[in-house]
Image (cartoon, rainbow, N blue to C red):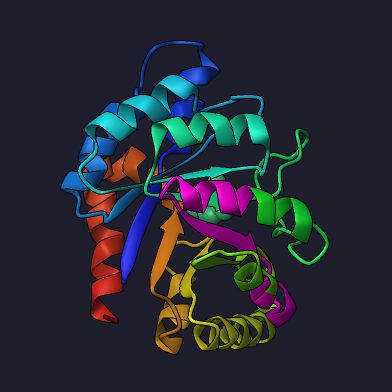
Amino acid sequence: MTLSVNIDHIATLRQARRESFPDPVQAALLVELGGADGITVHLRQDRRHINDRDVRLLRETIKTELTVEMAARLDLVRFICRVKPDQVTLVPELVTEVTTTSGLDVVKGETQLRRVVTILNRSGIRVSMFVDPEPGQVIAAKRVGARVVELNTDRYTKEPRRRDFHLKRLVEAAQTARQEGLIVHLGHGLDYINIIPILEQRIADGFSIGFAIVARAVFVGLQQAVRDMKHILEVYS
Ligand code: PXP
């Protein structure tokens, strides 16, 4: 089970002062020393945290897998095909949102998404799609050429009283993804506690986790925070 650590929030801290530090590229080194299997960054249209320089330097320096989350826009696709990360995760993006909350509507955007996925696949970049845990969306992701689906755990993490309901939806969507031959990732809002019931279901090939790890790092250091999460995943491997 893989852990890709999202380091956007290192860049958020840098941008809070428009400074050159803390540098997400340096953070990535510590994340890797902590045992992560990959580094994830979200290249937003407004470049509010991660910027083009970060993505280029991460590509040159990291030893694990680089995943770039981005909207399915042709200007971003052109840039990313030159950088060639290992994986692109397509996400919906609203300029007004604090963070990504809902999954992509692959069913509705099928034609445009197929065009983008085809270009990325031809460049040798694996495509993941961030979708809500709905079988219809998972099947559509497969139809447009994705190899990975990342199931959105946002509602599972935000509505603890309805956790069983949301967990069941995640399990069913993961089963559909498996039947379709897709790799199953999960992410958004996961922390050191709420991940446990998901791990008990043994539905995931990998996780994408950012905020909880960077927040813990303030107290224990980045390397240790990654090591702690990796240890939890290993218990269920
Ligand atoms: N997956 C996707 C698609 C995301 O957009 C994010 C947030 O950038 C994450 C995972 C990580 O979420 P969190 O920071 O809440 O762990």
Magenta segment includes 118: yes
User: Is 53 placed left or right of 235 in the picture?
Assistant: right
Q: Position of residue 52 (x, y in %)?
A: 48, 23
Residue 13 x/y as whole percent:
47, 25
Query: Residue at left 20%, top 50%?
Result: 34
Residue 227, by quadrant, is bottom left
Q: Could you tell me which quadrant the C terminus lies in?
A: bottom left
Boundaries of the magenta span: 116-139
Q: Which residue is farthest right?
A: 108
Residue at figure coordinates x 24%, y 38% from the top left? 62
Q: Is residue 17 left or right of residue 139?
A: left
Q: Can you say whether 1 is above or below 47 in the image?
A: below
Instruction: From the viewer's side, name the closer residue of 101 and 109.
Output: 109
Q: Is residue 133 visible?
A: no
Residue 39 highlighted magenta (yes or no): no
Q: Quadrant of the N terminus?
A: bottom left
